[in-house]
Amino acid sequence: MIDKAKNAEPLDLSYLRDMSGDSIEFMIEMLEMFKQQTPIYIDDLSRALEEKNWPKVSSCAHKIKPTFAYVGREDAKNHMQLMEVNARDQKDLEALPAALEELNSFIAILNVQIDTAKSELEKQL
């Protein structure tokens, strides 16, 4: 699951910078979209987990996974990969609620990091 020591790592926006052609406006827009969309995806994942709908848990985790790549958080992307595979293969299902809790605490830290990054980018406009 998520290595809590890595939770304090700064964002790596190099992928987002490359993808945007170094457009600060686009990068800010993507960071805002991450903060808006992620809670919706997490709610869907939570509901599917409560319902023990393993195909949907897998699908939701799969949908969330690439968003972490945009902000350079491979640890969170790998966490979602593990949740996706475990739900799909129906293995270690009892660990999924704890994995969701870890994800929620990670998102809280990530949102602070995104706000900081966004503020730094806005200074460059």
Image: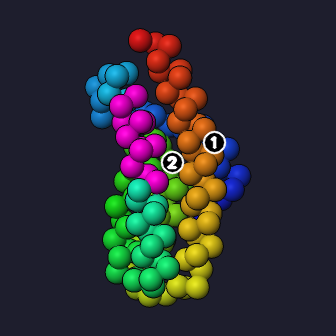
Please give the residue where the numbered disc 1 appears in the rendered image: 9
Residue 43 sits in which quadrant?
Answer: bottom left
Q: Which circle's residue, 1 or 2, is located before the other in the chain?
A: 1
- Is residue 36 covered in magenta? yes
Crowding around mark 1 (Cα neighbors within 10 Å: few <14, some 14 to 19, many 20+) is few
Nearest the eye: 67 or 15? 67
- At 41% across and 44% down in the image, what residue appears? 36
Q: Dot 2 lies on which element?
A: loop
- At 41% across and 56% down in the image, what residue appears? 40
Residue 73 in the figure: left or right of residue 17? right
Q: Amino acid at mark 2?
A: Arg
Q: Amino acid at mark 1?
A: Glu
Which portion, as a residue range, is magenta? 28-39
Residue 48: x and y in percent read: 42, 76
Residue 21: x and y in percent read: 28, 25
- At 48% across and 70% down in the image, what residue appears? 46
